[in-house]
Amino acid sequence: MTQIQKVGQIGVPVKDLQRALHFYKEQLGLQLLFNTDTMAFFECDGLRLLLSLPEQEQYAHASSVVYFQVEDINASYEKLLEKEVEFLGEPHLVAKMGQTETWMVFFKDTADNTHALISEIHI
């Protein structure tokens, strides 16, 4: 039996690949590995993010939430606000476990998918 060890790639459906490429590369600052007419692959510290035009209508729906880990959530939030990323609120505390606080803030991409920034702060 194979045991899953980590997530290697996350696929996000998009409606306009060029608009999505700009958002993920220029606004979020992810490293573009390569793209075709229908797909784009980004490197995200060992995890590949695949943006793709859905091949069939049944796959043309919003994605799961992708949580992007950041070191300083407030600084990242401010920087992305300057790049006109549409946030759904401000960074907020979601959990405290011992000496670690987990903070997050949600945002929308250009295909109306909801994603989040997440940061673990040791206090």
Image (spheres, rainbow, N blue to C red):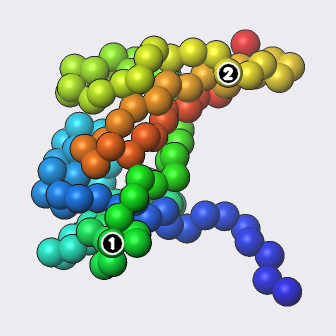
In the image, what residue occupies the spot 80% across and 76% down? 3
In the image, what residue occupies the spot 50% across and 47% down? 66
**Quadrant of the image for the C terminus?**
top right
Percent across and percent down for residue 92 are 57, 15
Percent across and percent down for residue 17 are 19, 60
Q: Which residue is mark 2?
A: 94
Q: Which residue is mark 1?
A: 57
Above or below, comparing residue 116 to residue 31 in the picture? above
Label 2 SS? strand
Percent across and percent down for residue 38 are 21, 74
Q: Is residue 122 visible?
A: no
**Count of residue discs:** 2
Q: Identify the amino acid type marked 1.
A: Glu
In the image, what residue occupies the spot 23% across and 59% down? 15
Q: Identify the amino acid type marked 2.
A: Val
Disc 1, disc 2: CB below 8 Å? no
**Quadrant of the image for the N terminus?**
bottom right
Q: Residue furthest front?
A: 58
Q: Nearer the viewer, mark 1 or mark 2?
A: 1
Above or below, comparing residue 11 to residue 101 in the picture? below
Viewer-side residue, 70 vs 84:
84
In the image, what residue occupies the spot 21% across and 26% down? 84
Question: Could you tell whether 24 is left or right of 70 in the image?
Answer: left
Above or below, comparing residue 31 to residue 95 in the picture? below
Figure quadrant of residue 100: top right
Dot 1: within a 10 Å radius of its alpha carbon, few (fewer than 14), some, or many (20 or more) residues?
Answer: few
Label 1 SS? helix
Figure quadrant of residue 26: top left
Q: Earlier in the sequence, mark 1 or mark 2?
A: 1
Percent across and percent down for residue 108 are 35, 36
